[in-house]
């Protein structure tokens, strides 16, 4: 589909990049730094917040698939077109948060933190497996915003940003390990006049990290080990202990903006509580199922493990 003269340019493109550095930042996190000349055109106006990109990862033994025009230009409908290609050679697309963007003497760099999953034998986790095996110079494709294609008419969500607090001075951030990069990035951009709570549930205390923020948001880390807490249970308990007091003490005009991202079932439970019991306005909040238990892929669009992916008409 080609945009007409009255439509804003499509803001996404495919960027050819390669691995420049690899660093483990916890027992379950690996930070991979990407570089490439194409990244000179990557970015959004202002802070990145929870900027989500997609990685096109090649299937084992297959060449890296190509996307878009000669310079990686994409148009609306590219994802559906990609889904229709032969599965064995198209690779995998997974969503990740940009941790940092830097200009260096060798060109621009992007940091992306990967969660390294431990999956049962016979069950695939393509992105985690790719990150675990990545080497310096390994090629991959990033699908993300092209700065020159973003205009005042471009919606934030079209660039990959979902964080829109709408002026709220009190925020609630909550997520499991898959949301740690996004919550960290959001906290780093919050101004001093913003308060609230951030809850991050991770597998192990060694996954805790220091997050810099000018805000007065209280950051609480929750570890499932060594108590073997069920996934999502610590997040649920922490929010139920905290949010009713926060809501009841909020003055008029100081509505809470909630941003929640985790396993889809956990997000569903937390959304039900926050909206129907705590009274948060769902139109002033963001709830994202980043993945689904027993499925490979992103959120509700993941495919049951052990099954061949089917075509889904959804760009997630």
Image: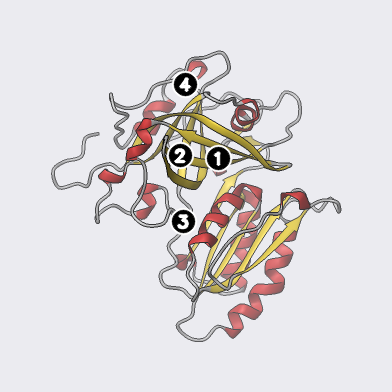
The mark nearer the N terminus, 4 or 2, is 4
Task: Please tell me whether mark 4 or mark 2 is closer to you in this view.
Answer: 2
How much space separates mark 1 and mark 4, taking CA atoms?
17 Å
Q: Is residue 230 above or below residue 273?
A: above
At horizontal 41% and vertical 31% (from top left) the residue drawn is: 36
Label 1, label 3: how far apart the Cα atoms are: 20 Å
Q: Position of residue 144 (x, y in %)?
A: 39, 40
Q: Earlier in the sequence, mark 1 or mark 3?
A: 3
Determine whether label 4 and label 2 are within 8 Å by CB: no
Instruction: Look at 52% across and 55% down and name the residue there.
Output: 185
**Which circle's residue, 3 or 2, is located before the other in the chain?**
3
Q: Secondary structure at mark 1?
A: loop
Residue 37 makes an appearance in the image: yes
Secondary structure type for disc 2? strand
Viewer-side label of 1, 3 = 3
State how far apart marks 3 and 2 are (Cα): 17 Å
Outermost residue to the front: 105
Q: What mark, if any, has residue 109 been given in the picture?
A: 2
Disc on the earlier residue, 3 or 4 = 3
Q: Which residue is mark 4?
A: 90
Residue at mark 1: 298
**How far from the left and from the top, in percent, is residue 181?**
57, 50
Residue 213: name its quadrant: bottom right
Q: Position of residue 5 (x, y in %)?
A: 13, 43
Q: Secondary structure at mark 3?
A: loop
Question: Is the Cβ of the residue at disc 3 closer than 8 Å to that at disc 4?
Answer: no
User: Which numbered disc covers residue 49?
Assistant: 3
Residue 233 visible in the shown view: no
Residue 84: x and y, percent? 41, 24
- 45 to the left or right of 287: left
Count residues near mark 3 (Cα–Cα under 10 Å), then give few for <14, some for 14-19, many for 20+.
many
């Amino acid at each position: 589909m080609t945009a007409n003269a009255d439509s804003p340019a499509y803001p996404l493109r495919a960027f050819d990049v390669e691995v420049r550095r690899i660093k483990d930042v916890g027992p379950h996190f690996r930070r991979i730094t990407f570089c490439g000349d194409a990244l000179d055109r990557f970015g959004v106006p202002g802070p990145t917040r929870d900027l989500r990109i997609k990685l096109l990862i090649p299937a084992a033994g297959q060449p890296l698939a190509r996307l878009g025009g000669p310079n990686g230009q994409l148009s609306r409908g590219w994802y559906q077109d990609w889904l229709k290609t032969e599965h064995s050679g198209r690779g995998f697309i997974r969503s990740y948060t940009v941790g940092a963007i830097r200009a260096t003497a060798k060109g621009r760099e992007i940091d992306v933190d990967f969660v390294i999953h431990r999956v049962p034998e016979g069950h695939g986790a393509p992105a985690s497996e790719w990150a675990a095996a990545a080497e310096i110079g390994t090629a991959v494709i990033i699908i993300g915003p092209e700065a020159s294609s973003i205009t005042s008419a471009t919606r934030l969500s079209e660039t990959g940003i979902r964080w829109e607090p709408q002026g709220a001075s009190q925020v609630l951030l909550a997520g499991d390990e898959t949301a740690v990069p996004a919550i960290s990035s959001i906290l780093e951009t919050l101004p001093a006049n913003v308060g609230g709570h951030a809850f991050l549930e991770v597998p192990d205390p060694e996954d805790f990290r220091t997050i810099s923020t000018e805000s007065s948001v209280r950051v609480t880390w929750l570890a499932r080990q060594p108590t073997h807490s069920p996934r999502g249970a610590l997040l649920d308990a922490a929010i139920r202990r905290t949010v009713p007091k926060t809501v009841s003490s909020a003055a008029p005009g100081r509505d809470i903006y909630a941003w929640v991202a985790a396993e889809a079932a956990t997000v569903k439970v937390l959304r039900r509580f926050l909206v129907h019991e705590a009274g948060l306005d769902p139109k002033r909040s963001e709830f994202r199922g980043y993945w689904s238990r027993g499925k490979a892929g992103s959120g509700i669009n993941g495919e049951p493990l052990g099954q061949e992916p089917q075509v889904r008409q959804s760009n997630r």
